[in-house]
Amino acid sequence: MDSPGAAPTSFQVIRAITRRDLAIGSRRRLVRLLFLASILPPLVLTVIIVVRMMAETATGYDLDWDPVLEFLQFQTLPVAFLALALGTPGVARDRAEDVLFLYATRPVLPWHYALGKMLAVALPAAALMLLPGTLIAILRVGVTRQLETGPAIVMVIKLAVASIAMGWAYAGVSVGPSAATKRGRWALLIALGFFIVPDGLGKLVWGWDALPLGPKRSVDALLETIFDRIDLLGLFGFFVLMLYGGIGLLMTTLRVRKEMIP
Amino acid sequence: MNAWIQLENVHLARGGRPVLQGLTASLAGRAVGLVGANGSGKSTLIGALLGVLRAHRGDIRVLGLALPQKAREVRARTGVMAEQAGIFPGGSGVDAVTFAGMISGLSYREALRRAHRALDALEVGEERYRPTKGYSTGMRQRCKLAMSLVHHPEVLILDEPTVGLDPAGRTQLLSLIAELRDEGRLVLLSTHILQDAEAVCEELLLIEAGVVSYTGPVSRLVSPNAGQITAEGPNLDGELAAALGRAGLRVLDQHPGRIVFASQGDEDLRTFWRLVHERGLEVRGLGREVITLEEAVVELMETSNG
């Protein structure tokens, strides 16, 4: 605090809420398990890249196979489960334990609370996409020499944008439902629905070429646009992801504002 | 001391129902008791004092800061132990208290240090490392009090802090609150238990149906000087009662051998003894009936209800 009795900054409050939720989450066995599941694919890909390089060196053939996009698209799945495990219990537990009024007795505004909870999901989710991606970029520059430093930096920046959008959306679809119920399991069910129902409906109405409406397909479309072919589908996916995050933040803020009143 | 809570014609309605109806009070006591029946508006007033609820009309100031405009500043300088709210879930007692410090702006390290100090002061031992889910009511109340104290607030708002405690726990908690008051913290104690208010508070705000029924020192209500004196003796009679009345004392009851009169202080007693002495009467028993805060408040409420 700047001076005795001065209200803390929004940053201090949000950081405290994020930090506590991460600490509580990291103590849960399921979250630890899903965290391990999220770092396995990058390890496997690293092995694949190194073996491929050794095979190409030994045989002199160019295998012409680059699994990075497939890896990143696959990686979004364990990260989604991790986000659900981290995000769905948070607000529901606070509501069930009647502690939202406690936040209101502190210099905490409803949006501080909502954003703090969402960042506790978004930050690890984004990091679990971005860090392995950065590791791959470093491997490609330093070991396999497939990339120059410049394009590698561009790749990491693009991946950072995709990771942040994904983390934000995953936080929205897990924390938002948590604000709608007092039971974490119900919140999980609702959040899973967001991963299944919108894309299912899209396919039902428009067939397999449907626009990405769910968070998982939207991330896939965005990654394809970044790493494979540039099209508007990825841009649409980006907006869908931002929308999911925005709605999650709004839902949580409004719910908390209502329940903070004694 | 200047008033630290100032209410000026505060009107506040909830769900279309007027709850506070022109509340006006200026509270300067180190410890103020907020009392009133269920639904009288105590919780609503606490919400308004924290800027969580907005008054539709009137002015509210806490520590000179206008509400709800300065709500965050007020909350940063206030510690609240809320009856209806629990403990931050998902961790141990020390985790919860540390977090309470952090959302008030302390760094993790400082919040942790102060959390341990607060829990030490409240005599919470190794239990602080256990998950809060298994805490007894007494331990929960201590933990809640530690959460309200961790950021060293100037003001403490305690809402029914002794609810659910056994007599020993209640006495212990009340003496802790009294210590905090004596250390210089300003305490607003909202309670149904008037003995709690009497034990801790020097000033009282009695609300009934959203209006102030009484505001002022507790001593004015419970002072022995405002009590009744019962005198007993073989020949205390109507003649003495009449003499007491002529001397300006209010005789409340009189039977042969027993007179009950209101005493405002030592002067009234001296008058009584003078009249007894002049008449050569014998007094075998003289007792003061001290009015408890509970009796005084019930009488006030009955009076105001007509």
Image (cartoon, rainbow, N blue to C red):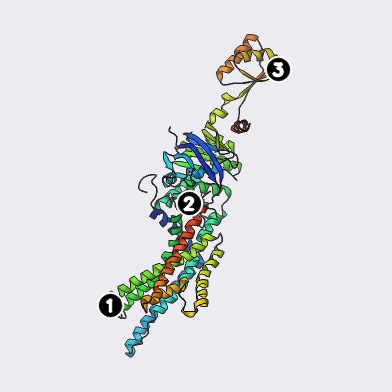
Within 10 Å of disc 3 (Cα), the crowding (few <14, some 14-19, many 20+) is some
Label 1 sits on residue? A148
Measured along the vertical axis of the image, is residue A202 above or below residue A186?
Answer: below
Q: Taking the image as drawn, is residue B160 in sight? A: no
Helix or strand or loop: what does disc 1 sit on? loop
Within 10 Å of disc 1 (Cα), the crowding (few <14, some 14-19, many 20+) is few
Q: Residue at x 42, y 52 (%)?
A: B102
Asked if marks 2 and 3 touch (Cβ < 8 Å), the reply is no
Q: Chain of mark 2?
A: A
Find residue B202 and report its horizontal and vertical position in percent: 51, 33
Q: Is residue A113 left or right of residue B136?
A: left
Measured along the vertical axis of the image, is residue A2 above or below residue B271?
Answer: below
Helix or strand or loop: what does disc 3 sit on? loop
Helix or strand or loop: what does disc 2 sit on? helix
The disc label shown at residue B188, or none: none
State the CA–CA distance, disc 3 to disc 1.
113 Å
Q: Chain of mark 1?
A: A
Q: Taking the image as drawn, is residue B241 in sight? A: yes
Mark 3 vs mark 1: same chain?
A: no
Asked if marks 2 and 1 touch (Cβ < 8 Å), the reply is no
Q: Nearer the viewer, mark 2 or mark 3?
A: 2
Find residue B253 and report its horizontal and vertical position in percent: 67, 21
Q: Is residue A130 left or right of residue B220?
A: left
The numbered mark, 2 or 1, whose residue comes first in the sequence reads: 2
Label 3 sits on residue? B257
The disc label shown at residue A103, or none: 2
Nearer-the-camera pick, A212 or B194: A212
